[in-house]
Amino acid sequence: MPRRIPRTSVQPATAASQTREPRGSAAANAGLVDYHLHTLGWKAFQDLAVAVATEVLGKPVETFLSSRDGGRDGAFVGVSAGNRSTIQCKFTSRADATLGVAELADELSKVQSLASRGLAEDYVILTNFGVSGVAAAEIEERFKAAGARTVRTYGRDWITAQIRERPRLRMMVPRVYGLGDLSQIIDERAYLQAQYILSTMGDDLRCFVTTDSHRRSIEALTRHGFVLLLGDPASGKSTIGATLAVGALDDGCSRTVRVTSAAELKRHWNPNEPNQFFWVDDAFGPTQYLHSRVDGWNQELLMLRAAIKAGARILFTSRTHIWESARPNLKISQFPLLGQSQVIINVHGLSDDERAQILYNHLKMGDQPAEIRTELKPLLAVAAANAGFLPETARRLGSTIFTTMLKRDQAGVIDFIEKPEPFLREMLENLDNQSRAAMALIFLHGHGGLSSPLESSVASETVERLLGVNLPNIGRALEAMNNSLTLLVQRQEGPRWIYKHPTISDAFATLVGESPELIELYVGGAKIERLLDEVVCGAIEIEGASVRVPSKLYNAVSKRLAESHGGWFVRRFLARRCDKPFLRMHLGREPTLVATLINAIKPTMAFDANTDLLAQLNAQGLLEKADRVSAARKIAELTIDVVDSSIFRDSKLASILTEPEVGELRSRFQTEIIGNLDQVIRSWEEDWLVEDERGHFEELKTSLERYVMFLADEDHTIVQAGIERIDAKITELEGREDEPVGRHASPVSPVSPSISQLATIFDDVDE
């Protein structure tokens, strides 16, 4: 039987609660960890207080109470068994500060009003001040005299103890991972993995704001073992992904694996090691929709279900527009979680308060001089409320390297938010030649990054030839830009230089596409995966394609494709991104390609890269008559033999056949499949060979539904009766399925806004 994922149960807490017996060799030292809570900042500490109220005190937050101080000492209402409590959050940035009645004078003056509203029956103070026993007794006495019925004060030491022993608290407020010694929090088995993940965040962790998207992501993983994070570029998907990955390691996952494709996930999933966490970044393509990625997932969705059922936790991220392109082509019936809204988290849907808090953190912790922050302060509330605002906007606004051209007035700030591409391009264009060469060298190494220390390679020699900068100068430029435009991250295979944020790569790719010299550099040195993602050959229009290759470089691209042995990835590229002259030339280089395509046609033909390319070759007049006939014969065989009605849905697939051939195939399908549907369903019940019987019947149902759409207004009573019979079978199979093991449902209450006016958040941003 699969092992359950270990979780810490929530126990009723008092100020004198003792820590439980720690687990694991590293956890045995957890008592030594001293979290420097004063470095959190008021908002992160308030998030921590909300998590403590929910997870430890059993009082999920219902709403926030108004505050005159802009939220830095927030108060909110907690609810338990129908009873409402006031929970006062008191923050200090002084490491050695202690709490007394004097520090609570403002709160004390409000108790009578709270009591009249029934909110002082249970008054809880959560603070990072030190609290002595004498002080706690005096505070209790004074607050009871003012009208509170019961008063509890939890200070720095108590909160630190809760963080030490409760992984879920750390997951809810991942800023704490940057405060303690990870080797004392996470056992040695997972420590290096966590370090690798956190290194990709650079200094962004200390600016992290716990948002509703982050909380709902944790809840989705807890309940379902799966979450799909959607958002526009620079909306914070990867940052949330990194915190979830570290939190999973902290919460007992045996290891975290970051993959990009179904094949990689299948290779790394170990059924005998169920507690794995898989982070599938850019699941359906990094900068544009990749049909090949979807093909891969369609083939492995049953494996995905099996992994989750066995105890794995899986995170997908995707740009929203790429997901919208991928969704119609995914076999969601085989993996229903992909279509369930409760596990699709749109990270672009930040509240105004969350945006303001993110912006505050980046301005406060960035490198902008105080005088610039003073100039910007009156404009920041408007910036945070702008619909185009993204977390990456905040990071750039807090960095001097991105704002040299910024006009510090309302129009200038709005342009900075709504039109980021010109600012990024201008910034890249203004780099010195050494820095531009460094950016080019990272660009050539793609998502895997540039190894450190630098070594001579074809890519570096190409950069030196075209830009005139040698390797030592490139190395110095990389170091100078570290943590602004570049980032040195720790990977299992060694240190790697990457872009600080992927949007820099997008902007650099735009410049590459406008420079013949850089296109030559790109084609000659870019990794094949990146070339397949971003290149078009000829006047082909594809959203996100950033590099248009001129005909003089066709031979170089074709040579790289032939040498890559890229299988369907290359075939999809040829089918969708190449004009007729390129295809004709490439067929000359690979004369057996067409025969290979025909032999490789497989069921679910609508998702097949082989038929896609055959259709394109036929449309361009590059498919010989005999080859077209052979392809048509293979398509007809699969349509009848495996009940694959793809041809009745996919016009591109149908274009390989002539109209009479399509008509004849329709007649055969009507006679041999629909006219004999009872026998087809019986044989489906008797002969299923796949592991997932339910998914097997979903395939048949989907095929029949496609045929119904093809029939339009014609009578399809027989088909509908067959679909209803299959539905009954699927319902029967659903009743047999066991619930996934290792899932723990724990309610996470959304946090209501705590600040009435965004401007108050920025009161001390220039201090």
Image (cartoon, helix red, strand yellow):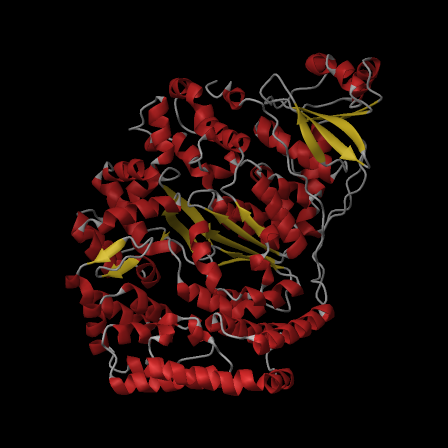
Quadrant for the N terminus, please: bottom right
Residue ID at (37%, 29%): 414
Left or right of residue 395: residue 149:
right
Left or right of residue 362: residue 750:
right
Against 661, is 168 above or below?
above
x, y percentage for residue 244?
57, 48
x, y percentage for residue 462?
21, 55
Residue ID at (32%, 74%): 615
Left or right of residue 110: residue 628:
left
Question: Is residue 93 among the parts visible in the rendering?
Answer: yes
Question: Is residue 472 among the parts visible in the rendering?
Answer: no
Query: For residue 431, which quarter of the picture?
Result: top left
Question: How many labels were placed on the picture?
Answer: 0
Which residue is nearer to you in this view: 263 or 622? 622
Query: For residue 750, which quarter of the picture?
Result: top right
Left or right of residue 764: residue 516:
left
x, y percentage for residue 696?
59, 76
Residue found farthest to the left:
552
Which residue is nearer to you in this view: 410 or 588? 410
x, y percentage for residue 64?
66, 27
Residue ID at (72%, 60%): 4
